[in-house]
Image (tube, helix red, strand yellow):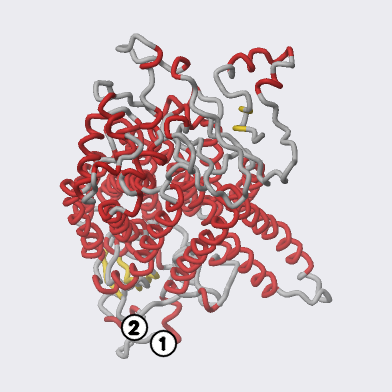
Amino acid sequence: ENGSLPPGDAAASAPLGGRAGPSGGGGEIQPLPAPHPAAGGQHPGCSSAAAAAPSLLLLDYDGSVLPFLGGLGGGYQKTLVLLTWIPALFIGFSQFSDSFLLDQPNFWCRGAGKGAELAGVTATGRWDSGDVANWTSPPTTPFSTASWGAAGNLSNSSGADGGDTPPLPSPPDKGDNASNCDCHAWDYGIRTGLVQNVVSKWDLVCDNAWKVHIAKFSLLVGLIFGYLITGCIADWVGRRPVLLFSIIFILIFGLTVALSVNVTMFSTLRFFEGFCLAGIILTLYALRIELCPPGKRFMITMVASFVAMAGQFLMPGLAALCRDWQVLQALIICPFLLMLLYWSIFPESLRWLMATQQFESAKKLILHFTQKNCMNPESDIKGVMPELEKELSRRPKKVCIVKVVGTRNLWKNIVVLCVNSLTGYGIHHCFARSMMGHEVKVPLLENFYADYYTVASIALASCLAMCVVVRFLGRRGGLLLFMILTALASLLQLGLLNLIGKYSQHPDSGMSDSVKDKFSITFSIVGMFASHAVGSLSVFFCAEITPTVIRCGGLGLVLASAGFGMLTAPIIDLHNQKGYFLHHIIFACCTLICIICILLLPESRNQSLPENISNGEHYTRQPLLPHKKGEQPLLLTNAELKDYSGLHDAATAGDGLPENATANGMKSM
């Protein structure tokens, strides 16, 4: 569980990734050993092939270095893991702030000189039956429905001319309100607990309604660029500098957002806020993974996810407490001030230092760990420190994510997970809109808070299910199961509901629109449940199979793909839901492709993290189901491979490997 080697194995003969952990599937094939040092790229300053690569003992971080430091049992390591959990709460606040800052409220024309009663509010603060025709609801989004919040959440704002834009649709069964977009000023009914938000501040309705969607995806676009750029930088200069600079700049841009004077300034600053937020999310995710032994990685990551969800659940209360969007924005950003202390208390990733051969810095950090944990240096039974002393003169060797293009297997694994992440987060919006859109009219969902907490509860249930499924089926089996559920929910919603709608038109069919709506809600809940798990598990899977030297770059690619999937929601809303059905069909087809591609992925449960590209390249696919005892695997050893004249090249390339090595690992004899 600490990542230590099985009894009887020599430390120097067990390269990273070659240790077979206790997997639930049983009988997994071990990855190939690291290639012979002479085959790798020799360091320019070295004259012999033996000095081309560092000691395998140092590269086997999970099997040698981590047990020497006490695994996750060391008090200092536990403190560092806790420090990666706390910011997840602040991240949860920032990620879900758009639902409150940019919620499109109900609005109606302000009565000039006729007081509040003409605007629709009586002296008692309640609506009269004749007042309903004086208001217009915004287009429905997953968190915006045609219902009123508390009577106190009313704000007045004077704005520019509305133009000659056609009026927004009126509430069902209510009178038409053709004059709402011909007004010069509006009154607003905000449903999110705020007295004023960005929409009511700058009258982003009618002709200016499109600016709301621009502001929404400015944060997402910032996140996408941030994931891609900060991921590459973190692999080159380290996780700690990127984390600390991201914290500094998110404080600058985030607090400046609250001082915006117009919506253009707001959207621009939100882009840079998203960019910096991406750096914090990505580096904390990588640090958390790299601190943990194989048996604890998934649990530690899921705890961080639950903390972020706590931020999602607390956001409505925070909004009701602040009352004003500027105060809410400042309150969301200010907790990041506490993270400035990380400069002095949070070290660089030791795993990354070892993988990039920065052994001088790694030695200092190991001594720091042993001092913090009050460890006895004599506990180094595997001789990590003596081996480290021999390698101190080696120059650092850093790698960029573009190197993955020249690999054979690694780039395919990353691409598959990128497509899975894009599909999972992209189709999630389709299910959310189907459940809360115009076509489904359920009293329970005709309230902002019901919408918000329904989505949050589904995400929470999805994460709880992931904990159980991954424990029994592993990463690949769990991802495959959730993707199958997503595909079934999507196809049934597209096909079965159309069939039900067709038969409901016949008077003798016994079916009504309410039956169709109930089926739609059921499939939408299942789809949201499964697609959330697909997206989250794809990101975690990528963090495990991507080598340490390019882990942040690989994570950045998958997280950016998730951002592209989430970006489809404001784009579809910007076009007034045009193309929504085609959007759903495309993602439904992608789920079928993903089901096939998932079978090509390796299983990383209880396996050591790959440290360099060579380790990641040999981290290949194992059978989905274990071999039965005594069954001959359908894989040839190198000795058997040489009998085939057409495969001499492949056999020659594997001459430096053991005779029982196969294309996918070690064949048990």
Q: Is residue 615 left or right of residue 579?
A: left
Residue 528 or 212: which is nearer the viewer?
A: 528
Picture residue at 57% right of the left edge, 51% below the top: 474
Looking at the picture, does residue 32 appear above or below residue 499? above
Name the N-terminal-most of marks 2 and 1. 2
Q: Which amino acid type corresponds to the residue marked 1 in the rendered image?
A: Asp
Q: Which residue is mark 1?
A: 128
Residue 502 % position (x, y): 77, 64
Q: Which residue is mark 2?
A: 121
Picture residue at 56% right of the left edge, 43% below the top: 603
Q: Name the residue at the top extreme.
A: 47
* Count of number-bearing discs: 2
Residue 131 visible in the snapshot: yes
Q: Which amino acid type corresponds to the residue marked 2 in the rendered image?
A: Val
Residue 555 % position (x, y): 42, 41
Picture residue at 60% right of the left edge, 54% below the top: 473
Looking at the picture, does residue 195 appear above or below residue 239? below
Q: Name the residue at the bottom extreme.
A: 124
On-image quarter of the C terminus: top right
